[in-house]
Amino acid sequence: MTISALQKARYSYSPKLPLILREDIREIKPVLGQSTSAASDQEALKQLFPNTYGLPKVTFEKGHNTSIGKKFNVGVILSGGQAPGGHNVICGLYDALKNANRENTLYGFIGGPSGILDDKYIVMTDELINAYRNTGGFDIIGSGRTKLETKEQFKVCTEVCHRHDINAIVIIGGDDSNTNAAVLAEYFRAQGENICVVGCPKTIDGDLKNESIETSFGFDTATKTYSELIGNIERDANSARKYWHFIRLMGRSASHIALECALQTQPNICLIGEEVEAKNQSIEEITNYIADVIAKRAENGNNFGVVLVPEGLIEFVPSLKVLISEINDLLARTEKEFNAIETVAEKICFVESKLSAGSRKVFDSLPEEIKGQLLADRDPHGNVQVSRIETEKLLIQTVTKRLKEMKAAGTYCGKFSTQNHFFGYEGRCAFPSNFDSDYCYSLGYNAVLLLSANLTGYLSSVTQLSKPADQWQAGGIPITMMMNMEQRHGEQKPVIKKALVELDGEPFKYFQAHRDVWAVETAFTYPGAIQYYGPAEVCDQSTMTLKLEHK
Ligand code: FBP
């Protein structure tokens, strides 16, 4: 196989670990802290997790580890969307297992959670691991969006674990996958099975975070990749001075990605879904805001600019949120009938005829293209796939219309020519930044210390991440501590609370304090490509979000 020079160089990069994890693994012992409780719904969660609720937080210190030398067979699963650094979690797991005992085995289940259900796996070897060190992607074993959530599935997991004598499963996933990891851990305990489940916090969306988990992995690299591209577009815009670029950015729900990219590139406009919801803004109001900025810049002769649009925006606009939820319910109820309809135009008519009066009005106001996109396949949770809805194009249309009205009313609006972009998949498999390489390797390494101490239902945690790696703190957080009860598909379910952008949080406040200047002036910043080699201030910087949240 031919490999690039960078890939070759990255194979020999040694990820930086927190100091404690640099010790001989047999001389690192877990320390159990105080028992924990969930932030809310404690009683309900206690009932649902009688064996794993209230577990203590775990840290590590130097000292003889009595359990690490035993033989462990561990299964690892990559779950959900790709995020840079996933391979390094697996490398960290593998190295820690082998450092503890050369006889230990790491099974990689193929294609996501369905791999364990179908008992499809590979056994990791030095050769395989060495070919994936510090590389992007999840292709070492693949990922998938099957959910591990039913008792029947858990029974199959148990059988597969027995078949291979597996005593621990590591699930690398986002909030839903780790919620299910906690449920599986509880199931194993309730059944008297001695199989540990440990999770690792993954998602480029950055919405799996709380007091104990400072960031999910992949957010750093993905936002740096998008920011490089945005910076390049900004420079192009500032050179040609003839286009307004509307750039939609991934992040299914929360706007963390858009906010971080805005902090890194200082565009003229960045919309934040959570703010739109809090202010109950309509598409019309968002359109007016954008059009006003365009007109102000035109007054100064600047007929160009950059607008960042989070892909989750559409579900934060209250009227669209109601519409989408009506469509989701309708499609779930009429699945067969709907799927039998052949053309998009007919599907649109079918849906239109069944919406409430209010939602029908909103639906009718949308361009045909967007209507069709709103009816595309649902994700495994029955939700609309926002990555397939071209909100940036919708806004270009509404803004064009608004500018015409403003011109007709005598406002000078200059010339409005546009380009549209969507950045999502470009960032999910990038070579992990040094931050993500180090963080992910540490998460994997750390997970072995948790599972070898039979600590189940934990999320591998590394904190103090805004400091240099040697000051990072390694440990484990009981997953139930991060849970609350939420209404899902008409039922109260225990779930890890999704972290949305906090409007009183430091990253948003910083953005808010600067955005009016960025809107009118051309204050673009150009972060450039991720650097892997060179001085720490160029190569080892974490995100602005992390720095502002932990300053
Ligand atoms: P995860 O939550 O599984 O990490 O995935 C996040 C994400 O990348 C979103 O940003 C995006 O909307 C979605 O996945 C796209 O999903 P798919 O890969 O199935 O198209």
Image (cartoon, grey):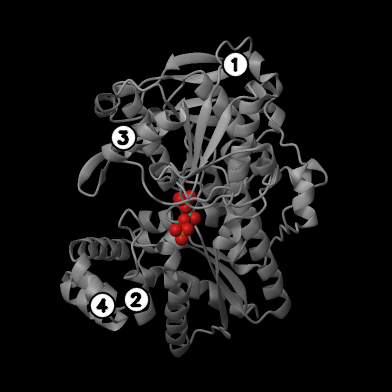
**First in sequence: mark 1 or mark 3?**
1
Kind of residue at badge 3: Lys
**First in sequence: mark 3 or mark 4?**
3
Image marks 1 and 2: residues in contact by CB distance under 8 Å: no
- Measured in 3D between alpha carbons, the distance from the residue under mark 1 to the one under mark 3, in whole angstroms, is 29 Å
**Which is nearer the eye, 49 or 300?**
49
Pinpoint residue 11: horizontal percent, then vertical percent.
75, 45
**First in sequence: mark 1 or mark 2?**
1
Residue 533 left/right relative to 407: right
Image marks 1 and 3: residues in contact by CB distance under 8 Å: no
| Quadrant (top left/top right/bottom left/bottom right) for the N terminus | bottom right
| Residue located farthest toward the front when viewing the structure as drawn | 163
Residue identified by numbered label 4:
347
Residue identified by numbered label 1:
69
Q: Quarter of the image holding residue 16?
A: top right
Is the C-beta of the residue carrying label 1 under 8 Å from the nearest atom of ligand 1?
no
Question: What residue sits 28% from the left and 24% below the top?
Answer: 46
- Measured in 3D between alpha carbons, the distance from the residue under mark 3 to the one under mark 2, in whole angstroms, is 40 Å
Question: What residue sits 55% from the left and 61% below the top?
Answer: 425
Residue identified by numbered label 2:
372
Residue 343 vertical placement versus 500 (above, below): below
Kind of residue at badge 4: Lys
Pinpoint residue 146: horizontal percent, then vertical percent.
38, 49
Residue 394 left/right relative to 227: left
